[in-house]
Amino acid sequence: MRLKSFIILFLIILAPNILRQVVYLTTFLETGEIDFIDSFETRKIYESLPFLGVIEEIIIGLIFTIFWFFNDIFGKFEWLRKFGKLKWLRFFAYGWISDALIDFIFVLLWLLFGNWGWYLLSPIIRFFIREIFLSYAIFGPVLYKSGFGIRRLSLYFSLFGVLVLLLVIM
């Protein structure tokens, strides 16, 4: 693995997630609300320092990029080889960009319908379904196994995020 490959992948998977923070911040500034956010830590960030969301995304992006290149980075350690090839860890990157797409969809639904039926569920259930189950148990593994290129998916998800952003500012 070359540093250039690491940086390129990091930026590719970071793009929709930074855009998510832009959509969140813009929606928050336009409406004064954070009801569209189900993530506990993100809600706390937006109640105090919204710009910390970008730092959170950078840290998560670095971790998932390391997961992507796990075998290249740590394959030289004998004790790790007993676990075999760990390319399956790449599903985390797919799950993470899917998480951004899901958040774009939920912001759009919130803009269109306000606190619709989804918000009748408890915050813990909403968090689990939206942030863990859909992203990392469903979309991450399915997209990884399907062979979709992460570059293309990141681009498509980001374009959808730009459309949501445009709706927010209109």
Image (spheres, rainbow, N blue to C red):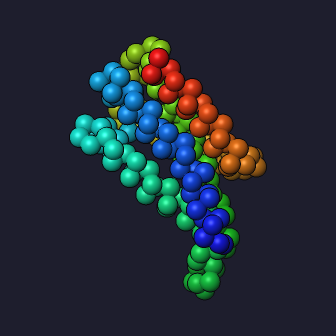
Residue at 58% in and 84% down: 77
Q: Is residue 144 depicted above or below 127 in this figure?
A: below
Q: Where's residue 148, x and y in %?
A: 74, 46
Residue at 67% in and 49% down: 150
Q: Quadrant of residue 138?
A: top right
Q: Is residue 62 depicted above or below 80 in this figure?
A: above
On the question of residue 43 being in view, the answer is yes
Query: Could you tell me which quadrant the N terminus lies in?
Result: bottom right
Residue at the extreme top of the image, as rendered: 113
Left or right: 122 as drawn, with respect to 20: left
Residue at 65% in and 41% down: 155
Residue at the extreme left of the image, as rendered: 48
Left or right: 53 as drawn, with respect to 6: left
Q: Quadrant of residue 41?
A: top left
Q: Where's residue 139, x and y in %?
A: 62, 42
Q: Is residue 130 depicted above or below 5 in this figure?
A: above
Q: Where's residue 96, x and y in %?
A: 54, 47
Residue at the extreme bottom of the image, as rendered: 78
Q: Is residue 83 depicted above or below 131 in this figure?
A: below
Q: Where's residue 129, x and y in %?
A: 48, 36
Residue at 55% in and 65% down: 66
Q: Nearer the viewer, residue 97 or 77?
A: 97
On the question of residue 82 being in view, the answer is no
Left or right: 139 as drawn, with respect to 48: right
Count the labels in the image.
Answer: 0
